Amino acid sequence: EAQVTQNPRYLITVTGKKLTVTCSQNMNHEYMSWYRQDPGLGLRQIYYSMNVEVTDKGDVPEGYKVSRKEKRNFPLILESPSPNQTSLYFCASSLSPVGPQYFGPGTRLTVL
Amino acid sequence: SQQGEEDPQALSIQEGENATMNCSYKTSINNLQWYRQNSGRGLVHLILIRSNEREKHSGRLRVTLDTSKKSSSLLITASRAADTASYFCATDNYGQNFVFGPGTRLSVLP
């Protein structure tokens, strides 16, 4: 089944404790992206990747890192999480940067 | 930078009625897409309209695009309770980053 998977789905952590949210897609998509969703603000793009080893900042990249060592994986790294990073995070992939995006189920992160 | 802005923020209708949502954007675009999100879940792609298209249909969905007014509308005909969700428009800047609007919450009452 074609899908985008994210892990973990739920995470409660404390300020400053490094964490990684994994994202994997099995559709051989070139383009992958991370978003955060906050009430009243819609989805805001954090980082995107056009292909392996090619990443670029979205609208809200501060406090986040990404890597794209393999085509299928695009992990989101929070080196020192803070409470303002409490949010619902989505990973998405698509064949091209202008095509329909396929979204993962989301990761609800709470930083205390 | 917020590109797409949906209107209204929330809409409540009866089953069988039509629902219309609007999206406005600020800069020139390549494509405009509409997505649906059921409560807290991942977004699902509904329809893509290119900047040189004016109207597109998919089942009960009809999307229009007016590039002169920088606006798009999504019409859902003969709505069902299962259409209850949030709807988002998204624009891309010719292959660079994607920008989503804040969404319209649609409630379809049985």
Image (tube, rainbow, N blue to C red):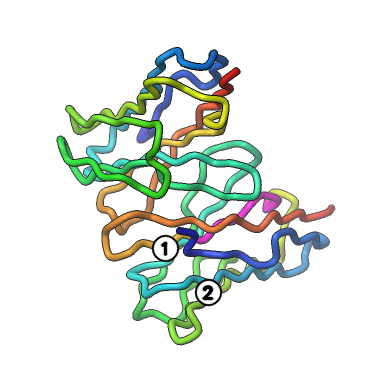
Tell me residue A5's x, y (percent): 40, 27
Tell me residue B24's x, y (percent): 54, 72
Tell me what residue is drawn at x 62 percent, y 36 percent: B40
Chain label for disc 2: B
Q: Which residues are magenta?
A: B83-89
Which residue has dot 2 on it?
B72
Tell me what residue is drawn at x 35 percent, y 48 percent: A58
Q: Amino acid at mark 2?
A: Ser
Q: CA distance from mark 2 to mark 1?
A: 11 Å
Q: Which of the two discs, 2 and 1, labels the residue nearer the N terminus? A: 2
With A54 as the anchor, is B61 left or right in this view? right
Which residue has dot 1 on it?
B91
Q: Amino acid at mark 1?
A: Thr
Q: Which mark is residue B26?
A: none
Residue that lies at the very extreme toward the bottom in this rendered image: B68
Query: From what the image shows, is residue B1 above or below residue A81?
Result: below
Tell me what residue is drawn at x 21 percent, y 31 percent: A68
Query: From what the image shows, is residue A105 above or below residue A58?
Result: above
Instruction: Look at the magenta stretch and give its main secondary structure.
Output: strand
Front-most of B12 and B110?
B12
